[in-house]
Image (tube, grey):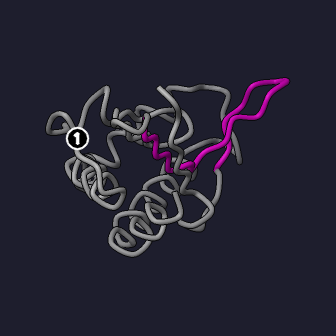
Amino acid sequence: MATVRAHLLDAHADLLDTVLVCADGVADSWDGDATTDRTAVVDPFERALGRAGVLDHLPAVLVGAVDALDEELPAQPVAAPPYVTITSVGPVLRATLDSGRLVITIRVFAVERDPTRYVRGPVDPGDALAVELRSR
């Protein structure tokens, strides 16, 4: 997965920075340093990513990650589930491959428990980026 991480951090540095800026804007809109309302995270974050043009580029990010693994996607990904999903922790990109399920998460928010609240997560692209290859 180091190859995919290196590819994403190099080839998509600007996009990752934009995702982080969008997350900052969402967190700045909260009354304090956290929110207990999931819709105060996901909905405004998805809108911010759309306005910034990020959503349209995430399928290409997924294609590049698959290419970095020297694998092929069975279909052309789109900026919608199951390929691209905006969650309460950040964008999640998924691809089912012969070798397993590639899952890329840009973790810009964190969920704390007891009580459940959403906080701003990592501010560095390398810390925010998680890449996994899960067995199918």
- Mark 1 burial class by Cα count in 10 Å: few <14, some 14-19, many 20+: some
Q: Nearer the viewer, residue 3 or 35?
A: 3
Residue bearing mark 1: 73
Q: Looking at this view, name the residue that lies furthest to the left.
A: 76
51 relative position to 130: left or right:
left
Is residue 47 on the magenta stretch? no
Q: Position of residue 121 (x, y in %)?
A: 65, 52
Range shown magenta? 101-120
Quarter location, residue 14: bottom left
Q: Position of residue 81 (x, y in %)?
A: 30, 26
Element at badge 1? loop
Residue at x 53%, y 45% (from the top left corner):
132
Is residue 112 on the magenta stretch? yes
Q: Amino acid at mark 1?
A: Leu
127 relative position to 105: left or right:
right
Whether 131 is drawn above or below 2: the answer is: above
Q: Looking at this view, name the residue that lies furthest to the bottom.
A: 10
Q: Nearer the viewer, residue 13 or 69?
A: 69
Residue at x 30%, y 49% (from the top left corner):
62
Q: Position of residue 26 (x, y in %)?
A: 50, 47
Whether 103 is drawn above or below 38: the answer is: below
51 relative position to 119: left or right:
left
Predominant SS along the magenta part: strand
Whether 114 is drawn above or below 56: the answer is: above
108 relative position to 25: left or right:
right
Q: Position of residue 109 (x, y in %)?
A: 60, 45
Q: Total label count?
A: 1
